[in-house]
Image (spheres, rainbow, N blue to C red):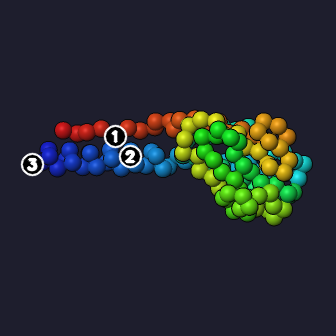
Amino acid sequence: MRFASRNTLIAGIAVSLALASTAAFAVDHLVTANPNLTFTPQFLTINAGDTVTFTNTGGFHNVASDPGAVTSFHCSTACGASPIGDPNGALWSQRITFPDPGTVGFHCEAHGQAGSGMFGTITVSPTPVELQSFDVE
Ligand SMILES: [Cu+2]
């Protein structure tokens, strides 16, 4: 009886740590759309589950994923299919989640296209395994 309740407690702690490992390490990254028709940073590497906040600091811009990107988006003052998310001169900001590992090219539809002009690339790495759960029998 005494050992059974102790083991139950340990198992409960392990489950709590495993749940914390998926949520606690997600990071928000900032990418600005700039008046000089660039994105900063242009290239970045993040972990799956992280978010990127795209912010327009001036100019008539949007941010759209390239064809074939593992995560798709089309955003400015809102995200959605055109005309929603079309280039806009407001100082908009949108946070996008990237759940899947892979490559996500993006561009401004007013000033670039996939791989040229006002464009960038996000490399999404698999989420690092920080902690693992285990069974206590
Ligand atoms: Cu632009």
> Which of the image's four quarters has the C terminus?
top left
Give how far apart the Cα atoms at labels 1 and 2 are: 7 Å
What residue sits 14% from the left and 46% below the top?
A: 4
Tag 3: amino acid: Met
Percent coordinates x, y for residue 19 in the rendering: 40, 48
In-front residue for pair 113/24: 113
For mark 3, what is the residue?
A: 1
Furthest residue in direction left, as rendered? 1
Q: Kindly check if marks 1 and 3 are in contact, taking CB atoms under 8 A apart as contact.
A: no
Give how far apart the Cα atoms at labels 1 and 3 are: 23 Å
Secondary structure under tag 2 reads helix
Which of marks 3 and 1 precedes in the sequence? Answer: 3
Question: Which label is found at residue 17?
Answer: 2
Tag 2: amino acid: Leu
Give how far apart the Cα atoms at labels 3 and 2 are: 25 Å
User: Can residue 16 be seen by looking at this rendering?
Assistant: yes
